[in-house]
Image (cartoon, grey):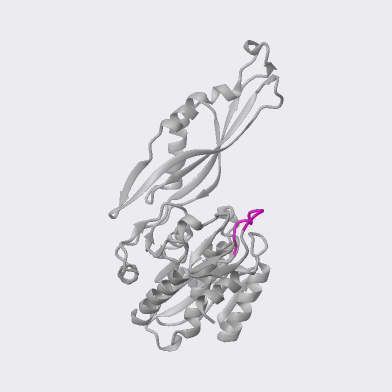
């Protein structure tokens, strides 16, 4: 089976977040056909595959099983020329195919490193609901990894670290009134005007970490207010999403939001996710950067590199998927890029030690 055929078979298995059972069953059946029974651990719809007590340094290839919900007029899974089409083709079933094909072919017992595969559910949802948390609790060996590769879409470049993210609900309070006599009330939507203007004029803030530039940005992504067309609204809520650079703590990030708001509204925080550490001095990162044949880049998004950082594990992002195709209506990926990632990871794993 070619990499393209393997990836297409995975794309054909629907696995929208919250419905990963079928693809987890598929991966588990594959794992049990290629590994001893004791090397396969399943927690809900997440799996760790490989030896967990090996004396060699352990590296992990990490991929999530879920996709975002399908677009109502999304494209049919298929391969046309060099392109693999279908939901999850770039994010990140092509990567899952590379992981599985590698570990079928590698001489696992004679490598200089031990290789674990991590497949997990619910990556596309809130931080607290990810399947990685329960896996970390059930498999202590994951906290002892020497290096992890989150195989997110990176266009074939190694992307270091990741920005942290938080969401804050900004609540503006007013007083209802008839819209013909607005002076008898206080318009909560109008009260948000100065803050919205500041955000619209706010420039991205560059932060350089070990030579890599991350951008801190704040964006309003949702707004809710008003209860009738002829009523001055007494309440208005905004969702503010803040992306912040590695090295900034969650406490510092929350303080930045409070400084922006400056008492103009009530702030409550939800879905806080830390940033991921840049591990520029890790030798496996350095080897992978060389083998990718591209300079490493900053990861201007949140990924589970942050979760591994919390465990003290060095991790990077590297995968064949295309960042511009992730979550797109007509998502696709390059089949040739699957082979390039396979070759780079093969070279890394067969020469590392």
241 or 290, nearer to the observer: 290
| Residue 221 image point, x, y percent | 54, 40
Quick one: 134 or 154, which is closer to the camera? 154
Quarter of the image that includes the N terminus: bottom right
Instruction: Say above or below: 197 vs 294.
Output: above
**Of helix, strand and loop, which mostly describes the magenta segment?**
loop
* Residue 159 location (% of width, % of height): 38, 60
Residue 73 among those drawn in magenta: yes
Residue at 38% in and 40% down: 204
Location of the C terminus (image quadrant)? bottom left
- For the residue pair 303 and 312, the one nearer the viewer reads as 303
> Which quadrant of the view contains residue 175?
top right
- The answer to whether residue 302 is seen in the rendering is yes
State the image coordinates of residue 12 (x, y, percent, origin top left): 63, 69
Q: Furthest-left residue in view?
A: 211
Which quarter of the figure has residue 132? bottom right
Residue 216: percent from the left, percent from the top? Answer: 40, 43
Find out whether residue 226 is within the magenta segment. no
- Range covered by the magenta-colored residues: 66-74
Q: Looking at the image, which residue is at 45% across and 52% down?
A: 301
């Amino acid at each position: 089976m070619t990499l393209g055929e393997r990836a297409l078979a995975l794309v054909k298995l629907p696995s929208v977040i919250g419905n990963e059972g079928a693809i987890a069953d598929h991966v588990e059946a594959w794992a049990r056909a290629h590994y001893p029974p004791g090397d396969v651990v399943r927690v809900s719809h997440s799996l760790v595959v490989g030896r967990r007590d090996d004396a060699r340094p352990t590296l992990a290839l990490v991929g999530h099983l879920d996709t975002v919900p399908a677009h109502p007029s999304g494209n049919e899974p298929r391969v046309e020329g060099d392109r693999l089409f279908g939901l999850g083709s770039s994010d990140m079933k092509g990567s899952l195919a590379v992981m599985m094909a590698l570990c079928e072919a590698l001489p696992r017992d004679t490598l200089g490193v031990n290789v674990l595969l991590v497949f997990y559910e619910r990556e596309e949802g809130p931080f607290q609901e990810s399947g990685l948390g329960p896996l970390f609790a059930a498999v202590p060996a994951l906290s002892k990894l020497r290096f992890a590769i989150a195989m997110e879409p990176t266009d074939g470049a190694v992307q270091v670290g990741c920005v942290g993210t938080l969401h804050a609900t900004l609540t503006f309070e007013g007083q209802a009134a008839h819209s013909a006599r607005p002076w008898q009330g206080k318009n909560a939507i109008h009260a948000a005007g100065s803050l919205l203007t500041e955000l619209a004029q706010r420039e991205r803030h560059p932060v350089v970490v070990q030579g890599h530039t991350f951008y801190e940005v704040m964006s309003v992504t949702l707004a809710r207010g008003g209860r009738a067309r002829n009523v001055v609204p007494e309440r208005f809520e905004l969702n503010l999403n803040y992306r912040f650079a590695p090295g900034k703590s969650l406490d510092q990030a929350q303080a930045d939001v409070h400084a922006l708001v400056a008492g103009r509204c009530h702030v409550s925080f939800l879905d806080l996710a830390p940033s991921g550490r840049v591990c520029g001095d890790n030798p496996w990162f350095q080897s992978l950067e060389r083998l990718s044949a591209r300079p490493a880049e900053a990861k201007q998004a949140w990924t589970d590199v942050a979760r591994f950082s919390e465990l003290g594990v060095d991790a990077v992002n590297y995968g064949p998927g295309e960042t511009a195709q992730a979550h797109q209506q007509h998502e696709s990926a390059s089949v040739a890029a699957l082979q390039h990632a396979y070759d780079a990871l093969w070279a890394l794993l067969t020469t590392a030690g």
